[in-house]
Amino acid sequence: MRSRNDWVIWAFLAAGLAVTVAFVLVPVGHAIVLSLQQADSFISTPRFVGLANYARVLGEEAFWRAAGNGLIYSGLSIVLQVLLGLGFAMVLNEAFPGQRLVRGLAVLPYLLPTVVVALTFQWMTDGSFGIVTVLLAELGLGPIPWFERPDTAMASVVLASVWLWTPFVTICVLAGLQGIPLSLYEAARVDGAGAFARFWHITLPQLRPVLTVVVLLRAIWMFNKFDIIWLLTKGGPLGATEHLPILAYKRAFSQFDVGGGAAVATLSFLILTALVMLYFRLFPLEEKR
Amino acid sequence: MASITLERVSKRFGNLTVVDAVSLDIADGEFMVLVGPSGCGKSTTLRMIAGLEESSEGSIRIGARDVTKLEPRDRNVAMVFQNYALYPHKSVYENLAFGLRMRKFDKAEVERRVRRAAAMLGIEGLLARKPRQLSGGQMQRVALGRALVREPEAFLLDEPLSNLDARMRVQTREEIAKLHREVGTSMVYVTHDQVEAMTLGDRVCAMRDGRIQQVGPPLALYDRPANRFVAAFIGSPEMNLIETEIAPGPVVRIGGAVLPVPASGFRLPGPGSRITLGIRPEHLAIADAAGPRISGDIAMVERLGDRTLIGLDAAGIGLKALLPRDDALAVGHSIALAPMPGRLHFFDGETGASLAVP
Ligand SMILES: Nc1ncnc2c1ncn2[C@@H]1O[C@H](COP(=O)(O)OP(=O)(O)OP(=O)(O)O)[C@@H](O)[C@H]1O
Ligand SMILES: [Mg+2]
């Protein structure tokens, strides 16, 4: 009995290990190897250069600007997504007529392909025909240079990202809210707690496990998010929305600097790993016994 | 401390009336038990007193204040919930302190009250723990403590013992009774367990389908049930209720026995009227040679230790009798029983109302 169980356990472990090696470790290892080489393209014969690519990349202002942009972009969009998601979830958790419909609508953006959202966003904000531009003009406002100025471009990609991914937070928090026993709120009401005290002393602590995971997932995704920015701005104008993934992509595929691109990608990975570890220290998933 | 007065309080959910014109006076310091079967509206009544449920009609007063429209926090009552509803992420100390902190008591007073309540309940050693590190009995004490520290005008308890095992239930029941004697605050206690109702209540309010059936001291409900429902609900094992009719004499016949109807104490209808005769199992005894006899075969025997409960099949009528211990009684034996004098109950055959003269 015991040996058969062991066999099954080993089989599952081996399968998991094989998948991890094939789809995670090999590509990551390959990227790291590339980052130590000099090559003009993926098919040319590479030359080993040690840490030269890293030295070069770290010496460039573009790298630090991209790192900073990445932190601003992911930081802003996470904070906004979590605050809005929390707010929406609390509204959707209350009973009101049409609750089901509104819940469905609230989830919609998350179901749309990023490409569709990016294109729609661009059409709506088009400088001459966009519906937003036209509406603003009727109100005597604008036009707003959505993607033309460095500061507004960053704000715009953050706005689009928040619109697109807040529903994820809303769904998770809504699920979390529904798991909170109503009797806790009733006990608190009898104990004299007002609406804010109930939120602070019951809702937030009860949501803590959900929020911890949601913020972590959002952080990882937003830090690595490539498509929405690429589709909206390609990192411009003047590199204002260029973060590490876009920098790595441009290096490797537009500027034929595969080693440099791989070095940026590897550094980005290291920065994210450090941030995640810091996060785990600050907000341990398991409560201390 | 204060009295609580409900005046024709009703509660409707949609067009379903779950509490129907309930009027109840709970005296200052009284222990009132609301008892009744599942779904009879006792929790809803309690929650309306707490303010967790808005009443559809009627008014509720606590002391001299009309609290009908007040928020729970403005009613100055404390509540103990069936599932305890302890704040899971707060320590026991913080659970107790929460209500005081919300009411802006200063630190020293919070500390003093928490320590005193903890001492009364014997949970001083648990103050640093989180609720999930407690046993059911300990959680129950913390829930009581959280109500106690508030020093409210009334305690409201909704089936506080139902999640405990039988031994803990008896022990905690005694502690709640003791607590009530010590603090002397009015308590409203909801249960579906008639033993809890009998042992705890100064008075018991029996409810059914959202209506009050009878209010009175536990023994009054036992001795003089106002109707068939209360008769069956209060007392264990349940009262025997036999559908029969008044025969000339006047007498009633059950299972071949002819029982004379008491000359006084009841306002009985004339011969031929349908009535329900009630006899508690503990008021049946082995018949002696003289007098009426209800004869039959023993269909069931439960040996309870000091007493023996038997089920008797008397010419198609099933009766239960709680007799002194008798190891010779066995299924299949024939036996004759007789009701103890003055222990019969008569109810209207239609309405179920008691026919006893008040
Ligand atoms: N929020 C609600 N909406 C609709 N019906 C409700 C609601 N709350 C309670 N009820 C109904 O009201 C009736 C009385 O409920 P209540 O909880 O007061 O019963 P109870 O006497 O406490 O029963 P139990 O012993 O099972 O706790 C039940 O039939 C219940 O289904
Ligand atoms: Mg109930």
Image (spheres, rainbow, N blue to C red):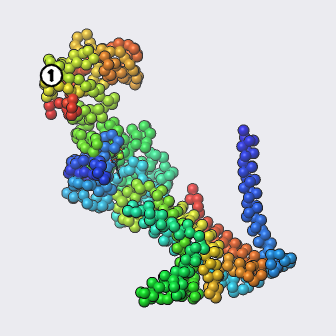
Residue A201 in picture, x, y percent from top left? 44, 63
Residue lying at 67% horizontally and 83% vertically, measured from the top left: A64
Q: Quadrant of residue B173?
A: top left
Q: Quadrant of residue A50?
A: bottom right
Residue lying at 37% horizontally and 17% vertically, measured from the top left: B298
Above-or-below relation of B82 to A134: above
Residue lying at 17% horizontally and 30% vertically, measured from the top left: B356
Above-or-below relation of B19 to B88: above
Quadrant for the C terminus of chain B in the image: top left
Q: According to the image, label 1 marks what residue? A: B271
Residue B181 in picture, x, y percent from top left? 29, 45
Q: Quadrant of residue A49?
A: bottom right
Q: Mark 1 belongs to which amino acid?
A: Pro
Does any portion of residue A90 appear in the rendered image?
Answer: no
Letter of the chain that mark 1 sits on in the rendering: B
Does any portion of residue B41 appear in the rendered image?
Answer: yes
